[in-house]
Image (cartoon, rainbow, N blue to C red):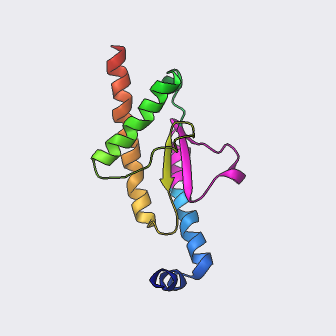
Amino acid sequence: IDALLWAKSIGGLEGLMARADANAKVIADFVAANDWIANLARDPATASNTSVCLTIVDKDVLALDADAQAAFAKGIVNLLDKEGVAYDIGAYRDAPSGLRIWAGATIEKADMEALMPWLAWAYRTQKATLSKAAA
């Protein structure tokens, strides 16, 4: 009942949808500003605004075999988990490697905005491991 009262207090269904849309837009803006990541859904009409699935499209990562690509994404997930920033954001087991971010109405937009620099940090940190391995 508390959840229903909360939903009503933020505008009901329209308010819930607006929060999810705002959160998804934070991610979409981040993706648009970073050439290493893309929405897994190529057609915006099929993209979820709540369970946003992202794929890593960095050319160096794409040059790796599928297992190494998955390890790269898992490295990002592990870094964020270790820092206490985000939990359980790895792609679904049967999905292509990448990230899955919950952007539903229960997430505050400010928290989503705070996550984006951490995603960039984790990517750069993980990318540095590729450079070290190549050396």
Q: Is residue 23 left or right of residue 117?
A: right
User: Residue drawn 47% across and 69% down?
Assistant: 106
Q: Is residue 60 magenta?
A: no
* Residue 123 in view, yes or no: no
Question: Where is residue 32 shown, x and y percent of the image?
Answer: 56, 45
Q: Is residue 74 left or right of residue 82?
A: right
Question: Where is residue 56 shown, x and y percent of the image?
Answer: 51, 35
Question: Where is residue 39 shown, x and y percent of the image?
Answer: 59, 44
Please determine whether, in this image, residue 51 is positioned above or below residue 57.
below
Please determine whether, in this image, residue 45 is positioned above or below residue 92.
below
Out of 27 and 46, give the one closest to the viewer: 46
* Residue 125 in view, yes or no: yes
User: Residue drawn 40% across and 45% down?
Assistant: 119
Magenta part of the protein: which range? 27-55
Q: Is residue 53 magenta?
A: yes
Check the picture and name the quadrant holding the C terminus. top left
- The quadrant where residue 41 appears: top right
User: Residue drawn 60% across and 70% down?
Assistant: 17
- Residue sitting at the far left: 83
- Residue sitting at the far top: 135
- Residue sitting at the far front: 94
Out of 99 and 115, give the one closest to the viewer: 99
- The quadrant where residue 107 appears: bottom left
Question: Where is residue 66 shown, x and y percent of the image?
Answer: 52, 25
Q: Is residue 133 left or right of residue 7?
A: left
User: Residue drawn 56% across and 37% down?
Assistant: 96
- The quadrant where residue 125 appears: top left
Count of picture labels: 0
